[in-house]
Image (tube, rainbow, N blue to C red):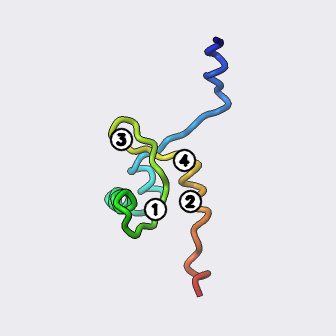
Amino acid sequence: MNYNSLLDVSVQVYLIGDNEIADLLSVSRSWIRVERHKRRHGQNHKFNIDPVMIGSMPRYRHEDVIAWINNLTPANDNR
């Protein structure tokens, strides 16, 4: 088996944590954690991105976060 083919550098996943997401969204880190908790327990939530768990540390795919932001409805469009 050629393991070099498994390590294709053209496919890179950039993972970010709660701190980076909080900075990106201008919200507190605890908001991210509370949203993740609500989602896990079937409660109403807004942040609906599945984390990638590395051990006990939740990480998120950067491209998923950007896609989620791009799909948000601007407040002015809620008329």
Crowding at label 3, few (<14), some or many (≥20) Cα neighbours within 10 Å? Answer: few
Q: Quadrant of the N terminus?
A: top right
- Residue corresponding to mark 2: 68
Task: Verify CB contact (< 8 Å) between mark 1 and mark 2.
Answer: yes
In terms of secondary structure, where does tag 1 sit?
Answer: loop
Under mark 2, the amino acid is: Trp
- Which mark is on residue 57? 3
- Identify the secondary structure beneath mark 4: helix
Q: x and y percent of residue 50 in the render?
A: 47, 51
Residue nearest the observer in this picture, 10 or 19: 10
> In terms of depth relative to the viewer, which is nearer, 22 or 8?
8
Amino acid at circle 4 = His
Q: Which residue is mark 4?
A: 62
Q: CA distance from mark 1 to mark 2?
A: 8 Å
Quadrant placement of the C terminus: bottom right
Q: Spatial distance from mark 3 to mark 2, Cα to Cα?
A: 21 Å
